[in-house]
Amino acid sequence: MEDGLLYYPGCTLKTKASDYEESAKAVMEKLGRPLVEMDDWYCCGAVQSLSTDDIMHQIAPIRTLCCAQEQGETEVVTLCDMCFNVLRRANTRAKENEDDLETMNEFLDEDPDYEGNVETYHLFEILRDMKDEIEKAVKRPLDDLKIAPYYGCMLLRPSEVAIDDTEDPQIMEDMLELLGAEVIENPKRTECCGSYHTVNRSDIVEKRVEDIVGRAVEDGADAIALSCPLCQFNLDYHQRATEFEVPVFYLTELMALAFGLDIGKEIGMKKHRVEPNALLKEKGYME
Amino acid sequence: MEVKRSEKDREFVDKVEELSGESVNACIRCGTCSAGCPFVKEMDVLPERIFKRVVLGDKEGILEKNTMWICAACYTCSVRCPRDIDIASIMEAVRQIVLRDNVDKVEVEEVENLQDLPQLAVVGCFRKETG
Ligand code: SF4
Ligand code: SF4
């Protein structure tokens, strides 16, 4: 693939997190590296299975990497942090453990076998190497916005899959600065949002949201930037149990805004519970 | 540390070690894991104490606690442990020992706002909490 990037969406990007897919596609198009969806892919299973004897749950992510291999590609990019974590960990296990790879291939029943030659990336790793292009693409600097980056867990832990320093990441800070935004340092930015407890223990998630969003507000943030669809859901939806109303953006939505893309036409921002419109109008980024 | 354990308890320790791939005897009880865990307020006992009970082979004592179900596998403890113990995998091993007896900790009917939830939350939760 010449300039394009082979893109693995995963299940949530097509539905609840379509704002993320839409904005990422628009932004990458502008940057000259369009996301090209895989011909075939499977749900990754969302969480990594940590048991040594559980090869079964490594099969779905490896099957997706097989599809990339089938397309003759050696790189796959994800937007979702959970997909990224699962794909990279399953792939690492396959690459570093010949016996496991052999067992996976037996289960897989694909022809030919997965050879372990595909690399997995998170979009942020691609963007980190495109600083000049990003700087040039900024038409409407976000200099009236104070943004607190939030990383959560899956981009940084465990260490063997981390895209940045596990305790002091800078990828998002650097990117927000390129967009012209004022970065609010949030000491809670690598703390877990409560993750899948959102399904049956919202009380736990609400406490995390109170803590994480509360600190961002205390430090003067107008909004939060992140990339994980589950973190976005938790920090956005569960603010309903708090006194806060802070928009939680995918970083690519803020990039789209800074690149001058038309909100409502070129990108949606339709699925936020805390509507970003009021803030964007107040700051003059929307009519 | 030499600890006397019954046969059954030894089986439990061995199973935890086998499933997690970690050696529980490496722990020096520094408490770093518990200090960094964002969920300790919700836990009956601290992650470090669960660890100690695993070393002692106290299966019954562990299974009546909620700690491993509150753990969200955020890996904060795992990246900070000075002995490089992957505590998140130990928690998973304890969960698996329960779940593999055909126990489910979450039922679809109990989920009130299923239509609001993103798919990855539902898939993740059922993967972590059903057998
Ligand atoms: S951080 Fe590691 S060594 Fe320290 S108490 Fe926890 S498991 Fe033991
Ligand atoms: S992995 Fe579990 S025990 Fe460890 S810090 Fe995270 S929630 Fe706490």
Image (spheres, helix red, strand yellow):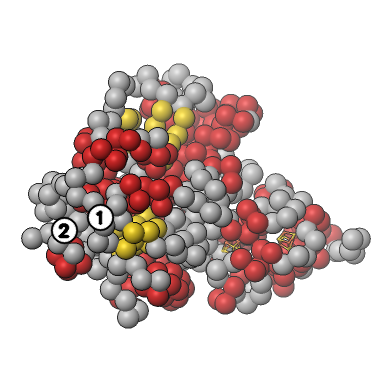
Could you tell me how far apart the alpha carbons at marks 2 and 1 are, in whole angstroms? 8 Å
On residue A285, the disc is 2
Does ligand 2 reach within 8 Å of label 1's beta carbon?
A: no
| Residue at x 38% of width, y 27% of height | A67
Name the chain letter of the residue that bears numbered label 2. A
Q: Are marks 2 and 1 on the same chain?
A: yes
On residue B130, the disc is none
Visible in this render: residue A101?
yes
**Given the image, on which type of amino acid does mark 2 rest?**
Tyr
Crowding at dot 1, Cα within 10 Å, few <14 / some 14-19 / many 20+, comes out as many
Query: What residue occupies the far bottom of the structure in this picture?
Result: A243
| Mark 1, residue position | A142
Quarter-of-image position of residue A236: bottom left
- Residue A274 position, x and y percent, is 24, 68
| Residue at x 23% of width, y 51% of height | A141
- In the visual, does B40 lie left or right of B104? right
| Residue at x 53% of width, y 54% of height | A168
